[in-house]
Image: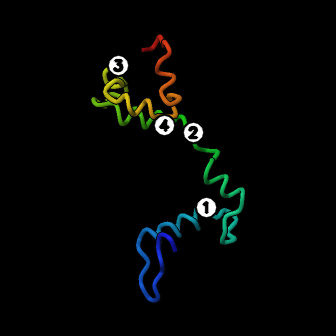
Amino acid sequence: ADMFANEEGGPEPDWVITEREQFADFRDLNKDGKMDKEEIQHWILPQDYDHALAEARHLVYESDVDKDQKLTKEEVLDNWNMFVGSQATNYGEDLTRNHDEL
C-alpha cells in the first residue's frame, strides 16, 4: 500500500502487473504465494550472478568513451568519481596501489 493503493475497480498500473509476473515467475520458486528465507536469499544473493564481473562491466561501459572495450588512463581519470565510489575498486583504495598494468 506504500507504493500502490489498489482502488476499487481501478486498473493496476503496468509496473504492478510486471512486478506480479516477476514474483510469480522468478521469486516464488515453490509457488506458495509468499517468499520464504531461501527464496529471499536467492533473490538477494543469486548463485548464478557474479557481482564483481557485473560491476567491472558497468565501470567499463560507463567510462569507455571510444567504446573500444579498453580503458585508457585518461578515461579512468575522467571518471575517477565512478571508480572511487565503486565496490570493485574497494571504494578507491585499490586505485592508490601500484599496478603494472596501469
Location of residue 39 by image quarter: bottom right
What amino acid type should be assigned to the residue bearing mark 4? Glu
Q: Are marks 1 and 3 in contact (CB under 8 Å)?
A: no
Q: CA distance from mark 1 to mark 3?
A: 41 Å
- Residue identified by numbered label 1: 27
Return the residue nearer the eye: 34 or 66: 34
Describe the element under mark 4 as helix, strand or loop. Answer: helix
- Residue identified by numbered label 3: 73
Q: Residues within 10 Å of mark 4 (few under 14, many from 20)?
A: some
Q: CA distance from mark 1 to mark 2?
A: 19 Å
Q: Tell me which label, 4 or 2, sits earlier in the chain.
A: 2
Give above or below for 46 relative to 57. below
Judge from the rendering whether residue 48 lies leftward or rightward of residue 7; answer left or right.
Answer: right
- Residue identified by numbered label 4: 55
Judge from the rendering whether residue 89 lies leftward or rightward of residue 76; answer left or right.
Answer: right
- Residue identified by numbered label 2: 50
Q: Residues within 10 Å of mark 3 (few under 14, many from 20)?
A: few
Count of numbered tags:
4
Q: Position of residue 91 (x, y in %)?
A: 50, 30
What amino acid type should be assigned to the residue bearing mark 1? Arg
Q: Are marks 3 and 4 in contact (CB under 8 Å)?
A: no
Return the residue nearer the eye: 44 or 24: 44
What amino acid type should be assigned to the residue bearing mark 2? Asp
Return the residue nearer the eye: 55 or 87: 87
Q: Residue at x 42, y 14 (%)?
A: 102
Q: Residue at x 50, y 71 (%)?
A: 2
Residue farthest to the left? Answer: 66
